[in-house]
Amino acid sequence: ALLPVLIIFTWTPPHFWPLALHRRDDYAAAGIPMLPVTHGDEFTRSSIFNYTLLLCIVTMLPFVTGMSGLIYLATAILLNALFVYYAWRLKFARYKGIEMKTFGWSIIYLAILFAALLIDHALT
């Protein structure tokens, strides 16, 4: 049970901070100390990228520990590659709307990742 919790814990920053970047001015106006408000956009973008790389490592743990098999592993590798792509674009190749696209992908990412974990467990 600890590995899914660790995955969600590691997933939360690169999931939520793109939304915080998108709504930075709203958080600042309301006096809510979100990361883009307290540390700036560039630091937040770097943090999203770094947490996404950490997430890639953490999501390999179910396979490494024998909790899952090749179905999960293949799915996790593909999903992680796409998440890194979004995080990289958010950090280095910015364009209008990338924050919300990254946020949206993170929701799909987690749903498919856990579905793969369940399917892998059911089939093996």
Image: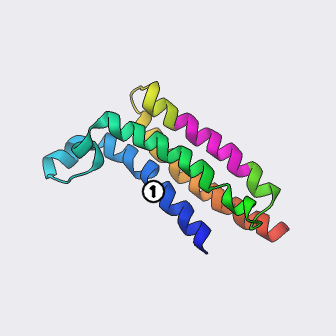
- Residue 119 in the figure: left or right of residue 109: right
**Quadrant of the image occupied by residue 25:** top left
Residue lying at 76% horizontally and 64% vertically, measured from the top left: 68
Report the residue marked by disc 1.
12
What is the x, y in percent for residue 95? 41, 25
Left or right: 111 in relation to 22: right
Snapshot colouring:
rainbow
Majority secondary structure in the magenta region: helix
Q: Does 49 appear in magenta?
A: no
* On-image quarter of the C terminus: bottom right
Q: Is residue 78 magenta?
A: yes
Amino acid, disc 1: Thr
Answer left or right for 93 relative to 57: left
Q: Secondary structure at mark 1?
A: helix
Q: The magenta stretch spans which residues?
A: 75-86
In this rendering, the answer to whether 105 lies above or below 86 is below
Which residue is rendered at x = 32% and y = 46% of the image? 20
x and y, in percent, of residue 32 in the image: 19, 54
Residue 22 vs residue 5, the one in the foreground = 5
Farthest-out residue, right: 124
Is the residue 84 above or below the residue 123 in the image? above
The residue sitting at 15% across, 52% down in the picture is 30
Number of numbered discs? 1
Q: Position of residue 117 (x, y in %)?
A: 71, 63
Q: Quadrant of the N terminus?
A: bottom right
> Which of the 4 image quadrants contains residue 112?
bottom right
Q: Residue at x 26, y 51 (%)?
A: 34
Side of 21 relative to 28 (left or right): right
Residue 59: name its quadrant: bottom right
Image coordinates of residue 36 in percent, x first then y, are: 28, 43
Q: Is the residue marked by circle 1 packed among few (<14), some (14-19), or many (20+) residues within 10 Å?
A: some
